[in-house]
Amino acid sequence: MSATLAPAAPASSAPEPEERGRSLASIPRWMWALGVIVLWLAVWALTKGNDTLVPAGRELTDVQKSLGGFRDDILASRTDNPLIQFTYDLGSGFTSVVDWFQRLLSIPDFPRPVPQIGWLGVTAVATWVGLAIAGWRIAVLVAVSFLSFGLFGYWSDAIDLLIVTFVAVGVSVLIGMPLAVMVGTGNRAVNAVTNTVLDIFQTMPTFVYLLPIVLFFGIGAAGAVVCTLVYALPPIIRIAGHGIRNVSETTIEATDSAGQTWWQRLTKVQLPMARKTIVVGLNQTIMAALSMATIASYVDGPGLGRPVLDALVKNDVGGAFVPGMLIVVMAVMLDRSTTAASEYSEIAARGGLDLRLRRIVLAATAVPVLVAIYLSRTYPWAAELSDLGWTPKVADAVDSFFVWFTDSFRGATQGFKDLISSLLLNPLQSLLAESPWWLAAGALLALTVVFGGVRALVPTVICIAGLLYFGLWHDAMVTLNMTLVGTVLVMLLAVVFGVAMARRRGIDLVLRPILDAGQTIPPFVYLIPVLALFGPTRFTAIVAGVVYAAPVAIKLVADGVKAVSPSTIEAGRSTGSTRWQEITKVQLPMARASLVLAANQGLLYVLAMAVIGGLVGAGALGYDVVLGFARSEEWGKGAAAGISIVLLGIMIDRIARAAARDTAR
Amino acid sequence: MHHPRKKAAGLASVAASMTLLLAACGGGTISDETKKNEANAGSAGECGEINMAVNPWVGYEASAYVVGQVATEKLGCKVNYKNLKEDVSWQGFGTGDVDVVIEDWGHPDLEKKFFEGEGDGSAMDGGPNGNVGIIGWYVPPWLAEAHPDILDHKNLNKYAKQFATSESGGKGQFLGADPSYVQFDEAIISNLGLDFKVVFSGSEAASITAFQQAEKNKEFLIGYFYEPQWLFADVPLEKVALPPYTDGCQDDPAKVACDYPETELKKILSTSWVEEGGPGVTLVQNFQWTNDDQNQVAKYISEDKMKPEEAAAKWIADNEDKVDAWLQ
């Protein structure tokens, strides 16, 4: 959900007066929560196992059948449905754009045996662009990244992924910026609606809409671009909209008094002043687009996801590792480039650069770039980079590392899994999923009121009603359980590593790239080692969720703790507090808003991996989604499960936001 | 802002001269090969293109690339391999994106949608591909050796406790498979009165990893699995005997208490592609080979880490007689 808007969202929401809590202020919130839980446990002990809504057999409910029927009707009408014909043409348009770029950059353009521009030319142009927009450091990073694509033997796949990403991001910007302006200048109602729609876009598991997308847009590049687009669009709308909205009122008023039109205000004041935030939005959109790389290859999307999936079907950990790491390299390259470009343009705008010198440098360096393009069109050595044969060696090394690791630690990891399962997972699952539905629902509502206030009650009621309607209540509770346990582990890591990163710059420097890798490496790369260590279990799913969610939470906590003012810490030190006291009494309490936000984001990120969980033996909603994707007759159930995941996500998010509002006050 | 126009003009002239240079200089091997390709383009065979779906498992890949390689090398067809899941492949028949699914394990629901009769007629049965799917309950080899009686379902309850895991709630764990397969294990377990609980692995990768680890660490594991599969070259799983399959014993999903039938794997083809005809169609319709053949190529791909094209070419070179039969 607002994952990408992270740092600003809850803290910036306007503080609104609320009476709840004031009159009962004498009783702290956790006491109320404890009361609810004790009551829940008492009723659970008496009613356990009744009305749990476990579906009998594998029959679909009527709602699930009608979802499937709806899909079948669309499918049957595909030859004469004007909407499908329109979207199909649109899809063909995407395919031809991607194809044109591919022939230019990555695949042989028949009758040529090679693309129009070979590796040398492409690398030179990319490096030059890096130099032009962000300076020589980025230029070096870009050059090294592009060379690594070629030297490891994945040139075509890597460039294909770049092409699909850029087409999807380009369309995201075209659609997203007008919507961002609407969000940034619109009223509350517009915002509320857009937010909910974006929440659905971001939490709906891709496997649910992959088949319909193929139906509407076709397979290959078209399907890949569209499914990437769906996931990549929300960040730019949210973050750019947020930036536009937050342009200072006084500036707008001052320029308004000069009698400007709405358009002038937008283009001369709001957009330029929000530029930095808009770039952050663009950056997050690119990251989201890259994270779809593997999924897109399920529908023949071109890119680095292909070799990852190819290796997965052979359980070839090493084979998946290299292309997986190249996706990380690409993500880091694009992330650092966009960030640096934004800073660079700011320096340039403030006159911090010698523009004349810069132009001379760019013009002078353009010459070798053109030569490189020429060479790469003419000579085979400059057109096709022969890989150095490193890939099989790296793959073998990775394989033997994981075999060694698994053999050495499997006993310990299995023990740890069993411990967490019997202490945390199983009891909590028993409480959530073996309570009668009315008890679990009632308890969730009561906890909502305790943590989020009456405001959060409405969305929770709607979401619970939705879960019941779609007929997967029991599975939803099992998924909720895994999500909660995963979040506990994420928060433990977040506090330990977040504080360490905030207190020691060295640790920060070492950890950041690892965290970036954790966030962008496709889970398919590490699923098999994790499976080997923990077996096909719910805990494996949790580990996958934690790998994905912990980086975000750790970064948020680190930034929050860093932001605690040094003078406060100084004051503490002068009174002679120990390091432990300093952390627990000063830094963590002061960073409480960040902790709440980290927990919220952690929860949603863990939930986002529910489907991956379905692939590794965790069952529940994730499995239902995978089932619907794999077997046509079960699509209705898969769709119901996808909607249930969305409902869980929205419910958790709204409760957490309401709680954060309370905490921030 | 000093002399932008002058600079721009300078840049433009550099660019222009480079373009000239680009246009002027032919030569080198790239342009040679381009000319060769141009010349060859005219003499291409009558085969045309084959859009070959590649479903995500190694055995499938083996069949697809062997057929594709024969079509390319012997018939001069252009084969487009498309990495797709089964459902997506079937959707592609009607749009012209997919011509051939070379190994189908049975999708009655999709047949209903796309076969002539009930469906839109975009797909048709292309006959058996010679492979036989053997689905059933399997245990790792060490377990079959240490406790031979485990290969009879009647003795499973004796060992139920040893099969228990953190997921199975005190009962024995039965590892269900990738959801792409139709599975009746919950019904079989309850109808045979077994003290087991089905835990779905959710993917082939998860099932394979589980069996590999169980063999390596001598752990109890029983689950749904199938042949032909490359894993058997590495870990030859043993099949547990269930009450034998009889016609109709799996008709009512709730009452199943018998083994899975042997599945004749078949080819599914695009109706319009078959109607167009040509040597490619004949090849695909003639293609048949055995489980051993497929396992051989699958082993080249998975264990020997050969590229699928290379693996296929190697097998084709070693089996000229079989390939010739397909080309008749």
Image: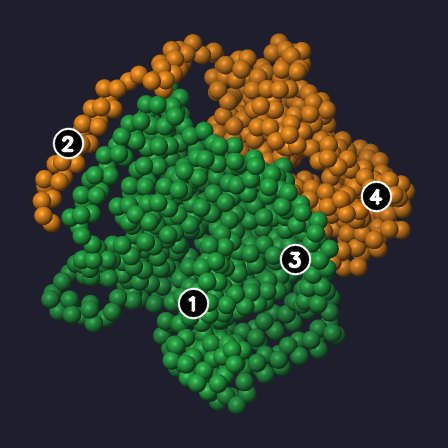
Q: Which chain is green?
A: A
- Residue A52, relative to residue A299: is it above or below? below
Q: Secondary structure at mark 1?
A: helix
Q: Secondary structure at mark 2?
A: helix
Distance from disc 3 to disc 2, alpha carbons, whole Å, reads 64 Å
User: Taking the image as drawn, is residue A130 in sight?
Assistant: yes
Which three-letter amino acid code belongs to the residue tagged 1?
Answer: Asp
Mark 1 surroundings within 10 Å by alpha-carbon count, few (fewer than 14), some (14 through 19), many (20 or more) = some
Q: What chain is tagged by disc 1?
A: A
Question: As drawn, is A240 to the left or to the right of A37?
Answer: left
Percent position of residue A371, x then y: 27, 30
User: Taking the image as drawn, is residue A104 in sight?
Assistant: no
Distance from disc 3 to disc 4, alpha carbons, whole Å, reads 25 Å
Percent position of residue A261, x then y: 15, 60
- Residue at point 59% right, 43% down? A398
Q: Are marks 2 and 4 in contact (CB under 8 Å)?
A: no
- Name the disc covering residue B13, or none: 2
Earlier in the chain: of badge 1 and badge 3, it is: 3
Residue position marked by numbered label 4 in the rendering: B143
- The answer to whether tags 3 and 2 share a subunit is no
Residue position marked by numbered label 1 in the rendering: A559
Distance from disc 2 to disc 1, alpha carbons, whole Å, reads 50 Å
Q: Which chain is orange?
A: B
Distance from disc 1 to disc 3, alpha carbons, whole Å, reads 29 Å
Q: Are marks 1 and 3 in contact (CB under 8 Å)?
A: no
- Residue at point 39% right, 77% down? A566
Which three-letter amino acid code belongs to the residue tagged 2?
Answer: Ser
* Of the pair B8 and A382, the residue shown nearer to us: A382
Q: Secondary structure at mark 4?
A: helix
Residue position marked by numbered label 3 in the rendering: A539
